[in-house]
Amino acid sequence: MNDTKDLTQEAPTSPRIRVRGYPLLARMADKGRAKLKGTLGDYHFNCPLDQMLFGFKGVDGDAVLKQLESGASNEQIAQWLDGHGTPKTHEEVEAWADQIEAYKPFDDPEKHDWFVGECKQLGLDPANTTLMDYLEVDDQKSFGK
């Protein structure tokens, strides 16, 4: 786990980065490795964002964490996801990935008020901001980049 990011010092990988088609995977893996190493900082593993990926594939966060603990690379985690949980075709993964990238919490009644407040703190227009946009700007703000 020598490639483990210290999330007290730097942000996890952008949620937009896709590994074998899966967005969120590289970010989730960064957080899982940091959790195992004790350098998670203010981030959370198995959070609602990670649950978007886990829920889509029908896998448990603890099972994924065990894979990370074994030293699995991002590519190996993606291969593990391909073979576990709910089977998905490449087309289903791609459609889900596109949907995740376009997701706007502003349009979700359960997340609307939270998202408006978060976006205002970052100077973003919540109606025109995707979750991915928000996460990237929040990471930049957190680490002064």
Image (cartoon, grey):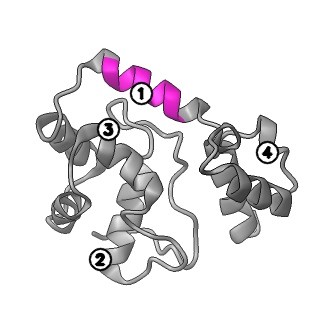
Drawn side of residue 80 relative to residue 142, left or right:
left
Foreground label between 4 and 2: 4
Give the residue type at disc 4: Pro
Label 1 belongs to which residue? 96
Q: Earlier in the sequence, mark 4 or mark 2?
A: 2
Mark 3 and mark 2: Cα distance apart in space: 24 Å
Mark 4 and mark 2: Cα distance apart in space: 34 Å
Drawn side of residue 145 relative to residue 96, left or right:
right
Q: Quadrant of residue 102?
A: top right
Mark 1 and mark 2: Cα distance apart in space: 28 Å
Mark 1 and mark 4: Cα distance apart in space: 22 Å
Give the residue type at disc 2: Leu
Foreground label between 1 and 2: 1
Mark 1 and mark 3: Cα distance apart in space: 8 Å
Give the residue type at disc 3: Phe
* Label placed on residue 56: 3
Q: Position of residue 134 (x, y in %)?
A: 69, 50
Secondary structure of the residue carrying numbered label 1: helix
Q: Earlier in the sequence, mark 3 or mark 2?
A: 2
Q: Residue at x 73, y 55 (%)?
A: 113
Q: Is residue 95 magenta?
A: yes
